[in-house]
Image (cartoon, helix red, strand yellow):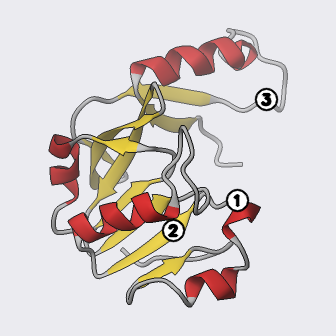
């Protein structure tokens, strides 16, 4: 639709996994209609669309994955651990988007109490909880229990940068 390949910014393990799982989109003579992607391995700050993006290295159980800081926004959506040095990359953000699968502990995602601990450490002006399962409860009921400035995210939520 964009008449160009989609740029994908990722770490080395994710690149390997994508190339293996979707090998057919990286062959020289693609079948018409398949997605096209340029994979960019990132370890340090990089620019995209004129914006500086800082990768935040987090863990999804034993799998290293990336979150990102884009200006005053930090985006961590599939994690259960953030090392102290990576937490420093989020200091001063105004908005934090972070995952919390459910209220109870989970082996590879933050729980709601764990996500709230990260939010308390980062101290953004506003925070949104995402990557939520049905086990969290009803949106309005859970949202009403959250600290000031913290909300459950929802489909089509738009955040101004």
Look at the numbered disc 3 and give the secondary structure of its residue.
Answer: loop
Q: Which residue is mark 1?
A: 133
Which residue is found at the position 50% from the left and 52% from the top?
Answer: 77
Q: Is residue 105 left or right of residue 22?
A: left
Closest to the observer: 159 or 56?
56
Residue 123: percent from left, percent from top? 23, 73
Residue of label 3: 34
> Of the residues tagged 2 and 3, which is closer to the observer?
2
x%, y% of residue 39? 49, 26
Q: Where does label 2 land, which residue?
A: 129
**Alpha carbons under labels 2 and 3: distance apart:** 33 Å
Q: Nearer the viewer, residue 118 or 53?
A: 118
Please report the residue visible at 50 percent of the width from the left and 64 percent of the height from the top.
112
Quarter of the image holding residue 137? bottom right
Give the tally of numbered discs.
3
Task: Calculate the distance from the C-alpha at mark 3 to the C-alpha at mark 1.
Answer: 30 Å
Q: What is the C-alpha distance between the residues marked 1 and 2?
A: 11 Å
Q: Please, is residue 118 above or below residue 154 in the view? A: above
Q: Residues within 10 Å of mark 1 (few under 14, many from 20)?
A: few
Contact between marks 1 and 2 (CB within 8 A): the answer is: no
Q: Is residue 115 left or right of residue 84?
A: right
3 vs 1, front mark: 1
Pick the front one: 55 or 103: 103
Q: Are marks 3 and 1 in contact (CB under 8 Å)?
A: no
Q: Are marks 2 and 3 in contact (CB under 8 Å)?
A: no
Q: Position of residue 37 (x, y in %)?
A: 59, 30
Residue 66 vertical placement versus 103 (above, below)? above
The quarter of the picture where residue 42 lies is: top left
Q: Kindly give the residue lying farthest to the front in the view shown.
A: 104
């Amino acid at each position: 639709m964009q008449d160009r390949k989609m740029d994908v910014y990722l770490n080395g393990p994710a690149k390997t996994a994508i190339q293996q799982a979707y090998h057919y989109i990286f062959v020289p003579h693609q079948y018409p209609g398949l997605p096209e992607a340029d994979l960019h391995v990132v370890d340090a700050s990089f620019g995209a669309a004129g914006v500086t993006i800082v990768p935040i290295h987090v863990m999804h159980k034993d799998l290293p994955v990336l979150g990102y800081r884009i200006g005053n926004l930090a985006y961590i959506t599939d994690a259960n651990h953030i090392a102290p040095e990576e937490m420093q990359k989020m200091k001063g953000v105004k908005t934090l988007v972070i995952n919390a699968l459910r209220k109870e502990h989970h082996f590879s995602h933050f729980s709601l109490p764990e996500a709230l601990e990260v939010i308390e450490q980062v101290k953004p002006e506003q925070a949104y909880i995402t990557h939520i399962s049905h086990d969290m409860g009803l949106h309005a009921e859970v949202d009403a229990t959250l600290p000031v400035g913290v909300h459950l995210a929802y489909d089509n939520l738009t955040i101004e940068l």
